[in-house]
Every structure is written in C-alpha cells, then in structure tokens.
Image (cartoon, rainbow, N blue to C red):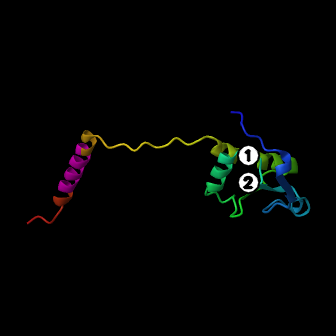
Amino acid sequence: MRSRFSIPPGEVRIIAIRAQGAGGQNVNKVSSAVHLRFDIAASSLPEPIRERLLQLSDQRISKEGVVIIKAQEYRSLEMNRDDALRRLQDLIDSVAVVPKRRRPTQPTKGSITRRLDGKAKRGAIKAARGRVE
C-alpha cells in the first residue's frame, strides 16, 4: 500500500548516536544508531492528520508534540536511518485512515435469553455443590 502523505526531508531531524547494548568494541566507537525527531505542529501534514497524531497515546510522542524514534537495530547508519523513517511513515499511515464511527446496537432477544439460560444453568450447578446431608 502506497502512502498518500510523504514527509519532506527538511521537517525531519536525524541525529547519529552511539547504540546501546552488546556489540563489542564496534558499539563503543561507531555512531550507528539514529535519533529521529519530527515536530507534528510545525509539519506540512494536513490538519486532521496532525490532530489525530497529537491525540495518539503513543510513548514515542512527547508532550510538546514531537515524535522521537530511536533506531538501533542494524549495524549500519543508513539502515537505521531507513528504519526510523519507515517507522515514522507507519505511524503517520496509521492515523491517515479515518476510523469508522461505531453505531451502538442492542443485543437480540434470543441472545439475551441464551445468556440468562446459561447463567441459570451455571448457578444450578454451583448450588448443587454443597454438603450432602
């Protein structure tokens, strides 16, 4: 599926940092991890998408409305940069689709009857468990 909203490169700040975790000497001397920062309010995204992004309860979105993505899965800087951009695009694509409004419905009479019959049957089983005199 092709995304309808592309992010201009000027709106994304990518900073190379050192990765965490195991990796031997390479992890200590090479800055191959990436911090991606994307300011939602200052972006050129359409207003409805910006609002839905800001309303998301995602830990990657700060209180100031900045998306912060840390990518350190790969050993190369380019692959981590591509991974961070792909994750940002996935986040934007997730709010690009307008959610359907839920129409509240009532349970059918048959489903109510079946539910109450099941509860009565279960209650009778439990009531029969007592001490026999």
Quarter of the image for residue 129 reads bottom left
Viewer-closest of 28 and 121? 121
Mark 2 neighbour density, 10 Å: few (under 14) some (14–19) many (20 or more): some
The image quadrant where one finds the N terminus is top right
Q: Which residue is mark 1?
A: 45
Residue 106, quarter of the rendered image: top left
Distance from disc 1 to disc 2, alpha carbons, whole Å, reads 8 Å
Q: Are marks 1 and 2 in contact (CB under 8 Å)?
A: yes
Residues packed near mark 1 inside 10 Å, few (<14), some (14 to 19) or many (20 plus): some
The amino acid pointed to by label 1 is Leu
Q: Quadrant of the C terminus?
A: bottom left
Q: Earlier in the sequence, mark 1 or mark 2?
A: 2
Question: Helix, strand, or loop for circle 2?
Answer: loop
Magenta segment, principal secondary structure? Answer: helix
Task: Residue 19: name its quadrant.
Answer: bottom right
Residue 122: give x, y in percent of width and height.
23, 53
Left or right of 119, for residue 9: right
Of residue 102 and residue 93, the one placed in the foreground of this image is 102
Residue 18 colored in magenta in the image:
no
**How far from the left and from the top, in percent, is residue 11?**
82, 50
Going 24% across and 43% down the picture, which residue do you hit? 114
Image location (x, y in percent) of residue 37: 79, 56
Residue marked by disc 2? 40
Q: Is residue 104 left or right of residue 67?
A: left
Q: Which residues are magenta?
A: 113-125
